[in-house]
Amino acid sequence: MDSGSSGNESLRRKRGAAKAKFRRKVKFFHAHVEKESSSEVLRWIFEDVEKSFDEIESIHMQLIQQRDSTSMDNEDQNMEMLEDERIEVRCLLDTKLGNISVKKDQTTVKLKPFDPPLFSGNVRDWPTFKETFNKLVVPQCGKEPYALLQRLESEAKELVRGVEDDFSAMMARLEEEYSHIGRILELILGDIRKLKPISEGTCFSRTNAVSDSGKKYS
């Protein structure tokens, strides 16, 4: 097998994996439509559908550059079918978002999308993230695992690996890790070590500095 054929085979395997991922995301979207999940959850899942489709399209374009007209005709048809699935999901999302509304003073007002902050695992950010998530996301999405997962990244996302379908289990892991007194004390001590020596006669005391540092994590 020459290098060109080997490269094509590798791309086809990647495309096969990307197709499987795309179809999983589409199936997941339809499952949440059936569950009547919130508009925000549907919007976040659709973003994953879009990313998965873009991944397939990128691989497909690489294969086109080494096009074999006979074999690529079928692949083009497959891409058209995937595009149809993507459009179907988009239309369903638009329909659902158009139907989700709240009544206020007997006037129908569409819910505005919101974008709560992401949490990557910085202990300093945890109290604010938790408060914001509980105030903004939970009232609209409920205790929906996917809604929480979408707001996590980096270290925090790795921490909840294996319990992504359980909201309470994810929250328990995050609380244990980022509300742990040891982690907080470690950060406070780090802040104290960064303080410059205080010259004699300065009114600002080290006690005040420690107090101010501690307030960041309460």
Image (cartoon, grey):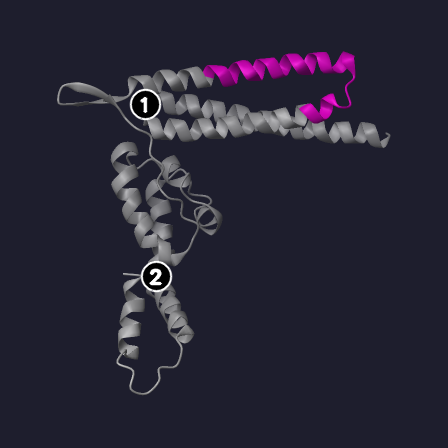
- Where is the C terminus found, in terms of image quarters? bottom left
State the mark number for residue 36.
1
Determine the image quadrant of residue 187. Answer: bottom left
Judge whether 123 appears above or below 39 on screen: below
Region rendered in magenta: 61-88
Residue positioned 27% across, 71% down in the render: 211
Q: Nearer the viewer, residue 169 or 25?
A: 25
Q: Secondary structure at mark 1?
A: loop
Three-letter code for the amino acid on which mark 2 is drawn: His
Judge whether 193 appears above or below 184 on screen: below
State the mark number for residue 172.
none
Residue under circle 2? 180
User: Mark 2 packing: few (<14 Cα in 10 Å), some, or many (20+)?
Assistant: few
Q: Are marks 1 and 2 in contact (CB under 8 Å)?
A: no
Q: Residue furthest right?
A: 2
User: Mark 1 packing: few (<14 Cα in 10 Å), some, or many (20+)?
Assistant: few
